[in-house]
Amino acid sequence: MWIDEPLTRAAEYPSGRFTVYDTETREYVPVKGAKIRVHNIIKWATAYTDQDGYYTIGKKYRTNVHYAMIFQNLKGFKIWGNWAMFAPANHNMRFKSNSGYSDDFDTNSNAWDWATINNAAYDYYNFCSQEGISLPPQNLTIWCYRDFVKSGMAWMIPRIEHLSLHISIYDLLQLHVGLSLGPLRYLLPDIFVFPGNQRSSYTLYETTLHELSHASHFSVVGTDYWNKYINYIANSYLNYKSPYASENIEHSGICAVGEMWGYAMGYIYQYEKYKDGVSKEDSYPGYDYYFHPDILWDIYRDSYLDKGEIYRCLTKDVTDVPKLRNKMTALYPDKAVDLEFIFARYGEYDGMGYWRFKNATNTPKYIHVSGNCRTNFSETYISNRLDVDKNPNLINFGYLVMPDETVIIDSLAYNGRRQYDFYDILNVEEIAPSSIFIADENGLILESATLDGSIKLFTKCGSWTEVAGSKSRTWTFSYTGEKNLPIIKQ
């Protein structure tokens, strides 16, 4: 142990730095907030690494000391590893110099996945403080369980009062033991993270933040909600060998809300770390089950709500997707129309309203829409137009609508809280401010309106019809183009 060193050498404070290899950035990054323990059998001391991976022990030693990294983070979570529930993951580094020791953990190191999960969790705790999201429960435990395919679970079983889940560890982990959950449930972790065989910082970061997002959800909804949540997953798995097999199982709505949040946040955080954020062109990168994480992804991507604002909607009364939609539109009424449209885009709505334009004349017409309307047609350049620079009554671009052809100008989601009716669509308050122009084949404007929610749209140059279905409603304006009618509003 003494390495044949003289006992009279100077006493020193051991210090150093620890890093772990990031397989995505291909560089070594600091191990953050991990406990470093040293001892010479007689004297023991600990310190935590800082955000740059550096540590300094607060006691002096004259002899070589034994170094170990203990994955009990200063942020308040523990990572279980080689000793499971009996102790945090422990990476022993043997006796080294009393002046300090540093190391870089590559993918062959026993500490690689522990350090990678540690860093992801450390980041998440910082994000919670910055973004208005509740921290996971105190003393959170994460079991890095290696002998399983890449996935994770935030079952929070030790924290659930009056647990009614009846499932064996064999069913839970596909282990070859039949351990009842009963009183031994307190020996389980809050979260499982399964790294799988592929050592990928990119995927492990997403998995860890997905599960920690669930833990924050648990912090606000409590144990009764979570008991229903994990019962759904257990029943789905036992009956269908899939955790999200059917929306016909009891409490599927709770699972839908929870997994929408978990999947969306996991990928959003992953993109923000490794792809410089979520851009307007980025579609949801994951897989859709019966629920649609795309909804929350799109809401965040399009800057309607930030993470903390979405999190405010995840209260214990939100037990299905329609209630999540209604909670969002109630908390953020100025964003209600846009939010409802995103839910409707993925089929989560009570009804859908379609505003259509029909060319009821016998000659082609161009239609040009700008502003808040969500047109589903592509405008074309009007090649035979007059000189638009000299005539303000011309348009450059438009969609050519042939006689008797109909195009959809906008789609409006409606539900129990917002019932769109015929008068609404005439005033088009929901899509204001927008502008619409109807022009002839040369681009000369025949009719126009600025939609500000106060003007009935084109009531003197055509007629409106309304057709209502069980889950849809269509308003069609048939443009007849009577002559010598004034333009409603330039």
Image (spheres, rainbow, N blue to C red):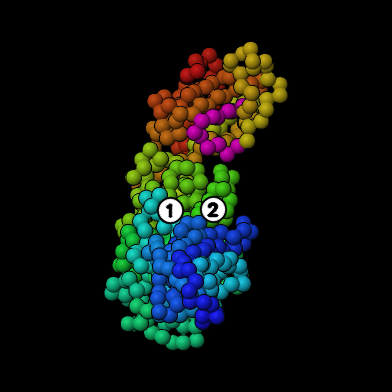
In the image, is residue 446 above or below residue 330?
Answer: above
Q: Is residue 360 left or right of residue 252?
A: right
Q: What is the residue that sits farthest to the front in this orientation?
A: 8
Q: Is residue 119 visible?
A: no
Residue at the image position 60 percent from the left and 33 percent from the top: 404
In the image, is residue 183 above or below residue 287?
Answer: below
| Rendered image quadrant of residue 141 | bottom left
Q: Categorize mark 1 by other alpha carbons within 10 Å: few (<14), some (14-19), many (20+).
A: some
- Residue 65 x/y as whole percent: 48, 74
Check disc 1 and give the amino acid type: Phe
Residue at the image position 58 percent from the left and 16 percent from the top: 393
Q: What is the residue that sits farthest to the right in this orientation?
A: 383
Mark identifier at residue 273: 2
Residue at the image position 59 percent from the left and 45 percent from the top: 281
In the image, is residue 274 above or below residue 392?
Answer: below
Residue 419 in magenta? Answer: no
Closest to the observer: 14 or 252? 14
Which element type, helix, strand or loop, lies under badge 1? helix
Residue at the image position 51 percent from the left and 34 percent from the top: 373
Q: Is residue 312 left or right of residue 343?
A: left
Closest to the observer: 162 or 13? 13
- Residue 32 x/y as whole percent: 48, 61
Check disc 2 and give the amino acid type: Lys
Mark identifier at residue 178: none
- Residue 105 x/y as whole percent: 58, 67
* Whole-number angstrom distance, CA of label 1 to CA of label 2: 12 Å
Check disc 1 and report the residue beneath it: 127
- Residue 55 x/y as whole percent: 47, 62
Q: From which residue to which does the magenta span run?
A: 366-377
Closest to the observer: 229 or 180? 180
Which element type, helix, strand or loop, lies under badge 2? helix
Q: Earlier in the sequence, mark 1 or mark 2?
A: 1
